[in-house]
Amino acid sequence: MFRFTAQGRIGRIDQVKGTSEIVRVSVAADRLVEGKDGAFTRTEWLSLISFDRAQNEKMLTELEVGQSLKVDGRVEPRKREVNGQTIYDHSFVITAFERLSAPKAKKAAQPAPAETADSAA
């Protein structure tokens, strides 16, 4: 069995409609890339899936977009037909997760300016 460990920020977390047995999580991680104009950061995305109902409930209640996350899981090879062609790809199935940080702080809403005595006159 192929195993993986991934760490990154949650970009999206969704329960598949019509079932509580499937949750999809998109995780982003940055890496340094050398280009002709020097080094720059590139964001890479990984799409993960979970079929464990208890784990899914825990993920949906404990996780939010923007949080850092570490996941462990298994890589499941799969074969499917698309327009008459056989496609081979992989599913990254989550078997365990750990929340590493809280989401980024949201900007506080600007309070409405208080009405002054001068403007009331």
Image: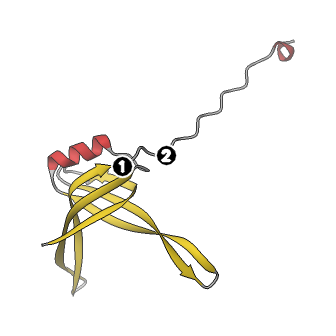
Query: Is residue 39 left or right of 51 when viewed as pictured?
Result: right
Which residue lies under the disc numbered 2? 104
Q: Nearer the viewer, residue 91 or 74?
A: 74
Residue 34, image x, y percentages: 54, 80
Instruction: Tell which tag, 2 or 1, sits nearer the viewer.
Output: 1
Please say if 37 is above or below 41.
below
Query: Is residue 13 left or right of 84 when viewed as pictured?
Result: right
- Residue under the point 21% across and 51% down: 18
- Residue 85 occupies which quadrant of the picture? bottom left
Residue 71, image x, y percentages: 27, 58
- Residue 29 occupies which quadrant of the picture? bottom left
* The disc label shown at residue 100, or none: 1
- Local packing at callout 2 (Cα closer than 10 Å; few below 14, some 14-19, many 20+) is few
Q: Nearer the viewer, residue 87 or 1?
A: 1
Q: CA distance from mark 2 to mark 1?
A: 12 Å
Disc 2 element: loop
| Amino acid type of the residue tagged 2 in the rendering | Lys
Q: Nearer the viewer, residue 5 or 111?
A: 5
